[in-house]
Image: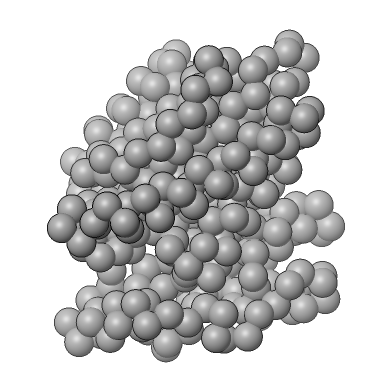
């Protein structure tokens, strides 16, 4: 394998953040957690670690932050629970693992990786995934860990309006993910989410579905998506990007832009993605007002922004 510069990018959800709501203090709190996650992953890559470890460790930092809609900061579903989805994808032989509809797990991304590494399966959901969490030794937390007044109020507001909210509009910011390329050019992606506020019990979004919200293949790209999951599933977004590269001969930037701003947006699907290919800088693209994101480029420059 050819040696490359290690690269990592992370996101904390895309959408239309309310600029009035997002004061300077809050903005820097979000950016600070994104940079901490980025650095955590980057240090692993710099010291010769593998892309798989870098994305999982970066996502763990964001799952532990109450600011993002994943792990600790997960939104409430219609039953007042936190049902979480996550997917781990390695570019090596498309090794992937996912879980959906789990509760009480501190770091769902760790459980998703265990599905890939300790079971013959790719995707566990609901009670079976929960049982796997209990026997696999991942850290389980009491309900209080996932409670915040802000999230509770969000749920009450959504319930009153009988709506289901993407955690991206006014007052709401979302899902987390990471993509990385290590020194040997191996790629990996990880995505984790609490889904949508007031979502129906049992609803699964794009995040844990390989090829829609998360994807990795060393020869093509690693992708982590964020946005309105139902649309991302219908348009198989991550795999569309990879296919546009493989069969349409587009580069990663063009492929991502075309998918997000073409069929997806035409149908009303709002969101974004972060992606990395076998060479070059990461791509961070979105078809809405902003995406919480941080990345390091091939010149070792660090960046973090929202809009
Ligand atoms: N894509 C996630 C879902 O639909 C939500 C998000 O990205 O915030 O579950």
* 254 relative to 95, above or below: above
> Where residue 144 sits: x, y (%)?
55, 86
Looking at the rendering, in which quadrant would you find the C terminus?
top left
Residue positioned most to the front: 25
* 206 relative to 142 in the view: left or right: left
Q: Residue at x 73, y 72 (%)?
A: 139
Image position, residue 137 (x, y; %): 82, 72
Q: Residue 46, percent across and down?
A: 71, 28
Report the quarter where the N terminus lies. top right
Instruction: Using the rendered image of the protein, determine whether residue 83 is visible from the camera's viewpoint.
Output: yes
Which of the pair 228/19 is nearer the observer? 19
Residue at horizontal 48%, vertical 67%? Answer: 66
Q: How is this picture coloured?
A: one colour
Residue at point 66% right, 80% down?
141
Front position in the image: 20 or 62? 20
Q: Nearer the viewer, residue 293 or 208?
A: 293
Q: Is residue 136 above or below residue 168?
A: below
Percent x, y for residue 110? 70, 59
From this view, report whether residue 75 is shown above or below residue 218: below
């Amino acid at each position: 394998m050819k040696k490359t510069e290690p690269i990592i990018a992370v996101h904390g959800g895309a959408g239309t953040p309310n600029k009035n709501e997002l004061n300077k203090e809050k903005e820097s709190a979000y950016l600070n957690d994104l940079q901490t996650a980025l650095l955590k992953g980057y240090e692993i890559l710099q010291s010769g670690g593998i892309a798989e470890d870098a994305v999982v460790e970066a996502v763990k930092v964001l799952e532990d932050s109450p600011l993002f809609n994943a792990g600790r900061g997960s939104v409430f579903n219609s039953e007042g629970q936190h049902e979480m989805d996550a997917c781990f994808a390695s570019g090596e032989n498309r090794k992937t693992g996912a879980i959906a509809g789990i509760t009480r797990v501190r770091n769902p991304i760790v459980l998703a990786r265990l599905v890939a590494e300790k079971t013959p399966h790719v995707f566990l959901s609901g009670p079976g995934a929960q049982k796997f969490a209990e026997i696999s030794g991942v850290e389980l937390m009491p309900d209080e860990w996932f409670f915040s007044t802000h999230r509770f109020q969000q749920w009450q507001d959504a319930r009153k309006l009988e709506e289901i909210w993407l955690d991206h509009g006014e007052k709401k910011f979302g899902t987390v993910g990471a993509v990385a390329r290590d020194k040997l050019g191996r790629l990996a992606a990880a995505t984790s989410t609490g889904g949508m506020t007031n979502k129906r019990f049992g609803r699964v979004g794009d995040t844990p579905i390989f090829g829609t919200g998360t994807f990795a293949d060393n020869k093509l790209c690693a992708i982590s998506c964020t946005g309105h999951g139902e649309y991302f599933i219908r348009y198989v977004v991550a795999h569309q990007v990879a296919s546009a590269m493989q069969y349409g001969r587009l580069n990663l930037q063009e492929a991502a832009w075309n998918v997000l701003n073409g069929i997806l947006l035409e149908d009303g699907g709002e969101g974004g993605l972060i992606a990395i290919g076998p060479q070059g800088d990461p791509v961070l693209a979105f078809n809405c007002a902003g995406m919480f994101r941080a990345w390091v480029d091939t010149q070792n420059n660090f960046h973090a922004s929202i809009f």
